[in-house]
Image (cartoon, coloured by chain):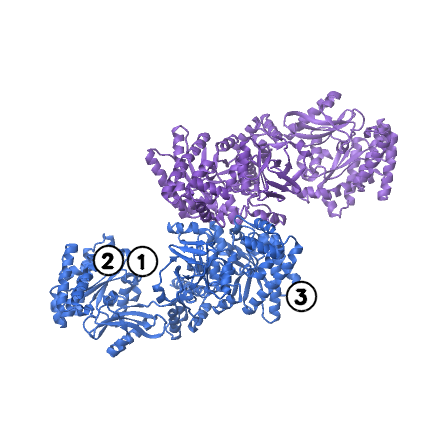
Chain colours: A blue, B purple
Amino acid sequence: MFSEGNKEMHQLLGGKGAGLAEMTKLGLPVPKGFTITTAAYLAFEKNGNKIAQNLMQEIINTLSNMEKEVNKSFGNIKAPLLISVRSGAPVSMPGMMDTVLNIGLNDQTVEALGKLTNDERFAYDSYRRLLQMFGNVVYGIPEKKFERVLCDIKKIKNYNTDLSLTVDDLKMVIEKFKQIYLLERKRTFPQDPQEQLSAAINAVFLSWNNKRAKIYRKKNGISDKLGTAVNVQEMVFGNAGEFSGTGVIFSRSPSTGARGMYGEYLANAQGEDIVAGGRTPVALERLKRSMPKVYAKLAAMSNKLEQHYHDMQDIEFTIERGEIYLLQARAGKRTSAAAIKIAVDLVNEGIIEKEEGLLRVSPETLEQMLHPDFDQKELQKEVVLATGRPASPGAASGRVYFTAAAAKKAYEKGQEVILVRQNTAADDIEGMVVSEGLVTARGGMTSHAAVVARGLGIVAVVGVNELEIDEQKKIIRINQTVLREGEWLSADGTTGKLYVGKVRTVRATVNKEFSQFLRWAKTAAKVEIYANADTTTDLKAALNFGAEGIGLVRTEHMFFKAQRLHQLRALILAQNAKERDVPLQRLAEMQQEDFYKLYKVAKGKTVTIRLLDAPLHEFLPTTEPEIALIAAQNGRSKGYIQARIAELKETNPMMGHRGCRLAVSFPEIYEMQVEAIILAALKANAEGVRTVPHIMLPLVSLAQEMDWMRDLLDKKVNKLFEKNNVILNYKIGTMIETPRACLIADQIADKADFFSFGTNDLTQLTFGYSRDDIGAFVPEYLNKKILPDDPFQVLDTEGVGRLIKLAIAQGRKNNTALPIGVCGEVGGDPRATAFFERNNITYLSCSPYRVPLVLLRMAQEHLDKRKRDNSIDTQIKK
Amino acid sequence: MFSEGNKEMHQLLGGKGAGLAEMTKLGLPVPKGFTITTAAYLAFEKNGNKIAQNLMQEIINTLSNMEKEVNKSFGNIKAPLLISVRSGAPVSMPGMMDTVLNIGLNDQTVEALGKLTNDERFAYDSYRRLLQMFGNVVYGIPEKKFERVLCDIKKIKNYNTDLSLTVDDLKMVIEKFKQIYLLERKRTFPQDPQEQLSAAINAVFLSWNNKRAKIYRKKNGISDKLGTAVNVQEMVFGNAGEFSGTGVIFSRSPSTGARGMYGEYLANAQGEDIVAGGRTPVALERLKRSMPKVYAKLAAMSNKLEQHYHDMQDIEFTIERGEIYLLQARAGKRTSAAAIKIAVDLVNEGIIEKEEGLLRVSPETLEQMLHPDFDQKELQKEVVLATGRPASPGAASGRVYFTAAAAKKAYEKGQEVILVRQNTAADDIEGMVVSEGLVTARGGMTSHAAVVARGLGIVAVVGVNELEIDEQKKIIRINQTVLREGEWLSADGTTGKLYVGKVRTVRATVNKEFSQFLRWAKTAAKVEIYANADTTTDLKAALNFGAEGIGLVRTEHMFFKAQRLHQLRALILAQNAKERDVPLQRLAEMQQEDFYKLYKVAKGKTVTIRLLDAPLHEFLPTTEPEIALIAAQNGRSKGYIQARIAELKETNPMMGHRGCRLAVSFPEIYEMQVEAIILAALKANAEGVRTVPHIMLPLVSLAQEMDWMRDLLDKKVNKLFEKNNVILNYKIGTMIETPRACLIADQIADKADFFSFGTNDLTQLTFGYSRDDIGAFVPEYLNKKILPDDPFQVLDTEGVGRLIKLAIAQGRKNNTALPIGVCGEVGGDPRATAFFERNNITYLSCSPYRVPLVLLRMAQEHLDKRKRDNSIDTQIKK
């Protein structure tokens, strides 16, 4: 019986059963009933999907107790008991399993019910519903067979809705339904209520393993082993006249989180009338007008439930002749914005603690909130052109262009641009910066295109297999559709879907509650969150979201602006030290200005600058006309440029002449960058902005490499101090991004002020997976379950994680306080954040628009950990 | 005194001193003398490079004892004692330090000596020599100053050699030498013998730190802290008339190892006459004729020394008026061939044990022996055109061609070819196979070019920076020299040197002694040696050298023959399973034939076949005309081929769609290969050649990958067994070549029958170094000592080694008998072999021509280990 359970008994009673028990306990009006437990289901399954004799006996016994309590009984023609049989799994699986209502009706009791309620139409309507649901759920007769009968009669009689059906009509329908049983299954409808009950329980048990339930569980990671409970409950009738009805209320708005009850109501109807869609429910205001007292009672119940559960509630209710019955109450689903507002409000109202508030919001929610989305209503009208991988969330519409140069030109004309590329290389960044969105035919969620797009905060859909690009004809083909350069395309980076034309978007804003929420998260998180940012715009956004500073400035991105690129190319094309001098000096000046601006915005917060990492060939042109242009600009022959390009070309550039390896060959580049960093910091300091530059070396794999670099840079810095007659605190740290660096991290730590894991490169090298090439095989690996996840999205704790743990232990062997961060793309992966929290990482750095997500995730991680620790404490105390 | 020391006292007495002591002990005729120890030297150094009073006193005391013994004394005009002062370090540094002879002569004793010996000319000649050496060594007067005086007088008097100088001439020379002292150093020659002695000792001590000695020590890894000993010894005179002379003998031939004394002799001369080059020594036969008894005595002494030292001896001797004196005896340097013959002969003669014989030969020696070499005499005439990296040893001359196709054509015309490429890709193999040698402008010692060349056993010089190739004009330029297609070039893969034209070569043969030696090595080595071989030719060579079988068949090499390539391309270009069918079947037949042939030659020895590893794009053409041809051959449009090439192109092919990843996408390729392997083995078995196929999977990184592959292949094999109604023992193992595979080796081991480390890929991924691209930065790393060695040549035991150790431990956790091999390129690296021996590796696999080297190295490693173990045992027993 419901009165025996409570809300903690989810596992045994299922969500619905536990909820009903809890509400019964609270004294709320819940129709009487009991729950057949998941343990009973598991016995059923073990018994070859048959209800064992003893279980059936127990059900009958419980039912008979219930009969006594409600003073009605099965098949009794004076007081016939009608019941519902509903599924209710431990984890909510809305609409996936079956339900049978109105059990207990038969040719006799239907008449009794008509007399008792003085409403023959209601009685026959209920009987019709039972025949329909029982036929469908228990005998598997297709729903449409019954629907056709109803449609036919409404057509003949010219009725608009089911409500127009008369008693005679219903009696005829019932006869036709009985014929369907005979025609379709050669069976009659069982007149014995107990037979109805046992068949219904059996069917609802079986629905645990129907196809859609299995798919749903698989998709949502719910174990097949849980099993379902079944709730047997006295019927209450929303279809018992105009003072009856059914509805759903939320204790606060699920769209905006606004305080106050919110919901929908349908008079003289049962739940399935809403589902069937024949009639449209109305806002709750109607109820307030028609039955103000009932409305007030409902509001009080809603409030009581929210206070009790400490969360916004989604409540199903039925009104039977002015009496309210609650059929279900559970935490309500809500939009991103509502989730945050509700959490913040509940805290401010003193209903929950801040910590609890932080645990109430799913981190993914925050990311969604920060990107504009397509207007869902408009979207429903659109046809999906193709679906790629949703690499950078949000919605973007623009005119398609196929090269960075064309995109730039269009942008300068004031156009909105969607850049469409086979895949992207470093020199596409200029085009990406000016684009609303990026669409590529190749690449995965962490391909160059995807990473840069997320970094830039632009929408990206990558790996659209159907996409064919003809750069010469300036057209793209997707399946049958052809788009010319300049035509409109819309890309949804949250779903990966593409639409022809322009779709309207709605942009979310960072409101008061969101800011407050982020401040709480920051306080709760033990791990610090930094942003990967190359511009003051990025940095401002990141600080606004609560970042502690910059964990990664990718200096190579700064070189892609035209003037810098020109100087950098002059540097690369130089034949001797003298020719290198002028471009080096120019670049130093420009970089100094870049860094100075960042320092000013950072206002003393950490700015970690990674020295040049990209291979030099990425800065040279690839096409004939570009080569000709560069040749002219630099006063070189085309042949010279081509020779230099050929010389710098690499078979596996990822493992080639890049990172600090460049500085071993050309120390002057790093010296130039360090000069820019130090002079910028001196200037900022002189202006009262206390700045401690953090200089980060990429791709260090050898202790001697670290020693050599440290020596080179310390010397350079000291010269600058001498020249300027001033000193400054500064740090030199290193990326840890090759397996070897992890293996000898103790040696590297001797000369490094901090570590920062580059999980992308580390994952690439640990697996031997080129991030830009995995599109060719990783999908098949995922498909065949050889890989559980894309390791660039979900940290491989077994392999890569082992190296990271080793590196942390080694790195802190002689310096327990060594700051160790992560600046890869795994900040949004819950397994990774838990892993890093557990392994005492100092900070995580991610793209600015991911800061809120990661911040919340790390706050939750820490709160969870504290909970676990407390529970361990308690156990120990016991 | 020499009689107090012995041969074990190298460290204190130096090599020469210990040798003189030992010979004295053996009763051999050694001029009397004593050794000033290295300890004395170290005291000298500590004393600010000054001889301390007490040391000088000790020297004087010892000298006075010696005077008594020989019944002569310093400055005595009746019996003047003349002595030599020679350096003698603990480790031989031939010619690096100084020597002063004839000390004790002055204006008085020279006359006395003339009278005593009745040979005034000899006396003055000796005095002249003293003045010359003392002036040079002690006062640092350039040698040429003295030489000019001698030249002048010979010119004036029209003499051919120094021997023509008369007593009067010599007296005049002596006067002129004394004037040189005054002119050059404003000093006189000290007439006091004791002053001469102390100055000479001082000078010889100082010569430990002269420039060339320091460079020599650095180059040969000799510690600067050892110091030198100094030998003070009574003079004996080879320049005392026609029954006097000096020479060098070897107890066996140092060129061929042939038994019997071998040497050179110069009558009436001292050692420096030979060095000065004025007179040419003659073969020892002359001595046999002129002084048969002396010759016989010498032979007896040579024999006695060899018996005593258990090794071929290099002996310096002087004959003074028919009396033999031995001045030095040491193990003689020898050629590769001699080293082996001598070791084998000494064992067979019962002089040394087999184990000792194995330790006597340097493994590098064996590799040298197997490659033809340029005729050294011819080479001296040639000008070195350029020097690259000596990637595959041996000597080759041929006509230069610049493409694989041109090379093939030339080969078919019967020409010898040197293939010259910028660098090589897989499809250059066809060209390499037909070439004598390969020269590339790029790449390091383990670049594709280098590895394949060594595998094919062809000569290769790679990374010739000065090389410019103009494929269109069909010329190459190296510095100022231009070579046209078809012109002759010679490449020395042992030294890395290139020569214009054709240089004659000499090919070494594998003789009886060599075979015997290899058999001993095989018995002594604990680790088994396999070969990397793709053809029966390779396999035969390997077996001939003592390999246990094949550790690595690279199946992709088999696909490069024209017919196969055609079928493989048809397979790659196929659009569906049906189109794939025919080429798959053809390839299966051809591969079956390949494997069958290998099994037949292997005669039951293991043949380990690695399934396809190379990315598919390597098999597609790259140039326009090739694409057109392939299109025509396959009945496809050029556009189709180009599209497929574009589709397969990868940014980092090393980390892309290759290895077992191919089989996840196209299981039919591995199934085809396994079918070929099993059917070939069944056929060989049916013919009585018991064959257990070893199938090896490349690039496994995941436990699930191993499971999936194992399942796929086991199923295929079982189907074949069923179909043929026969079964067969077979093994499926895996390469361990990614860091991740090492980290989770325990999981992989559950399904693998054996492991084989791929050290090349593992090194690439651990460091993040692309083997084909390191030419751009590793030389600078080596140069700046940031890297101690190229990690592709010398195993990085710190980083890569740590992963290997981890993988071995993990792999054997649940299966202590798991066979674990290595098939990388590190077999020739002594640090690597020691590492693998220490870590209980089961086998090493290397290119066939490296088998002897690795075999010997592993034998020595094991013998050394046993020695170490024994010495530990002894220590424990003590």
Expressed as whole percent of the image width and height from the top left, the position of residue A87 reads: 25, 61
In this view, the residue in front, A441 or A315, is: A441
In the image, taking residue B350 as reference, residue B377 lies left or right, namely right
Tell me where residue A156 sits by quadrant: bottom left
Give the Cα distance between marks 2 and 3: 81 Å
Which secondary structure, mark 2?
A: helix
Q: Are marks 2 and 3 on the same chain?
A: yes
Expressed as whole percent of the image width and height from the top left, the position of residue B158 reads: 85, 29
Amino acid on which the number 3 mark rests in the picture: Asn
Callout 3 environment at 10 Å: few (<14), some (14 to 19), or many (20+)? few
Foreground tag (2 vs 3): 3
Tell me where residue A315 sits by quadrant: bottom left
Which residue is found at the position 64% from the left and 34% from the top?
B501
Q: Quadrant of the C terminus of chain A?
A: bottom left
Callout 2 environment at 10 Å: few (<14), some (14 to 19), or many (20+)? many
Residue A629 visible, this angle: yes
In the image, taking residue B497 as reference, residue A840 lies left or right, namely left
In the image, taking residue A166 as reference, residue B817 lies left or right, namely right
Check disc 2 and report the residue beneath it. Answer: A205
Q: Quadrant of the N terminus of chain A?
A: bottom left
Give the Cα distance between marks 1 and 2: 16 Å
Which secondary structure, mark 3?
A: helix
User: The residue marked by circle 3 belongs to what chain?
Assistant: A
Which secondary structure, mark 1?
A: helix
Give the Cα distance between marks 3 and 1: 67 Å
Check disc 3 and report the residue beneath it. Answer: A724
Check disc 1 and report the residue beneath it. Answer: A216
Q: Earlier in the sequence, mark 2 or mark 3?
A: 2
User: Contact, CB < 8 Å: mark 2 with mark 3?
Assistant: no
